[in-house]
Image (cartoon, helix red, strand yellow):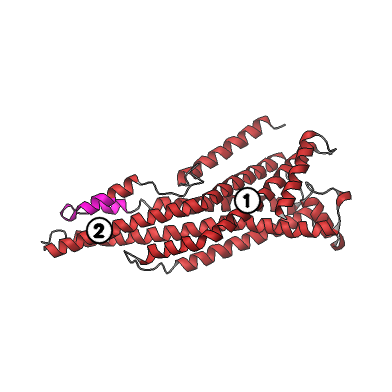
Amino acid sequence: MLSVIEVFAIWKLIRVLTGSTLISNGNKSLIGRVSGSIFYGNAVLSLILCWRAVNTWKKLSINWLRVETKGLLLSPDFSIKRKITFVVSFITLCAIIEHTLSMIAATGLDCPPEKYFEQYILSSHGFLLHTWEYTLWIAIPIFILSKSATILWNFQDLIIILISMGLASRYHRLNSFVKHVVRYEKRDGNMEKFKTEIYYQLNVWRNIREAYANQSALVRQVDEELGALLLLSNLNNMYFICLQLYLGLRKVDGVLINRVYYFYSLGWLMVRAVSVVLAAADVNLHSKRALPYLYSCPSSSYNIEIRRLKNQLTHDHIALSAMGFFYLDRQKLLQVAAAIVKYELILIQYDK
């Protein structure tokens, strides 16, 4: 059903571009139809990619469990459940508030209750329906599917954030274990060691190195499964942030509820987009945090496994990517912000 709406939205957009339909506000109608096509196009692709992620989750979770339980055993992260509960609750609450404000702004506070549903559909889906095309049997499926598309838009970002938190948590525990071992090496660095102690020390560092190698393989597997979803999420968020800024530069309706909705919607879009990038970037950030501990390891305890681990962490680039087009790290966030600022400066200069 989402695909049917998307095809119909593209058909309406083509009619505007070819001039085969008569509209009053051409620029405004064109922007609305492009945005509507992108919104439902994102919903269709998101549904397909989330369905694919669900189908591959069993294989991925088995591998994830194997990484957690075999080889180096680390203490569990007791705070991860609380963090995940907070993130899910926060995103759900903010998304509900944002969508509620959008429904109120679409009709205004003075809309009669008996006319609310019709006015809401015609206002929010003007790119699909004209006033003379409205019927209740068309409006009800559109209303349901618009809520489904909104849920999918938030859900795709939530998947990326939660899985990134899980990967970063594992790296954090590995880094803490390395810090503890290096502290032990510093304390007993000047003590004479027997061959059994040297062998035990070497074995510990080998297990640590293998744990990092297994973790990097897990990150690459997750990246392979979620790369398309990461690309879709970042492109979609960037488009709608630019759209909101563009509409804000042109004119925001003087009605208070419209101004409240505009600023809240823009702020929520930015928070969600930044959260996706920062959560994914934390995987790259935590993958390198053990290096300072390794460099501070005393020379008397230095061995071949420490050197191998140091080379592995230095030269192995671990990061989630958008199908290989770009890697998500903290520098990428600044690059995207700079691109948006350039876009807005061009609009201010040329928009009449």
x 41%, y 67%: residue? 77
Quarter where residue 213 is shown: bottom left
Q: Residue 135 location, x and y as percent?
A: 86, 56
Relative image position of residue 219 (x, y in whole percent) = 43, 54
| Residues rendered magenta in the picture | 290-309
Q: Where is residue 60 in the image (x, y as percent from the top left)?
A: 47, 60
Earlier residue among tags 1 and 2: 1
Give the left or right position of residue 294, taking residue 67 as reference: left
Q: Is residue 28 among what the camera can see?
A: no
Vertical relation: 185 (above or below) 3: below
Q: Is residue 129 above or below residue 347?
A: below
Q: Mark 2 points at which residue?
A: 205
- In the displayed structure, 219 sits above or below 65; it is above
| Left or right: 210, with 304 as reference point | right
- Between 67 and 73, the one nearer to me in the picture: 67
Instruction: Estimate how packed mark 2 is, as few (under 14), some (14 to 19) or many (20 or more) residues with alpha carbons within 10 Å.
Output: many
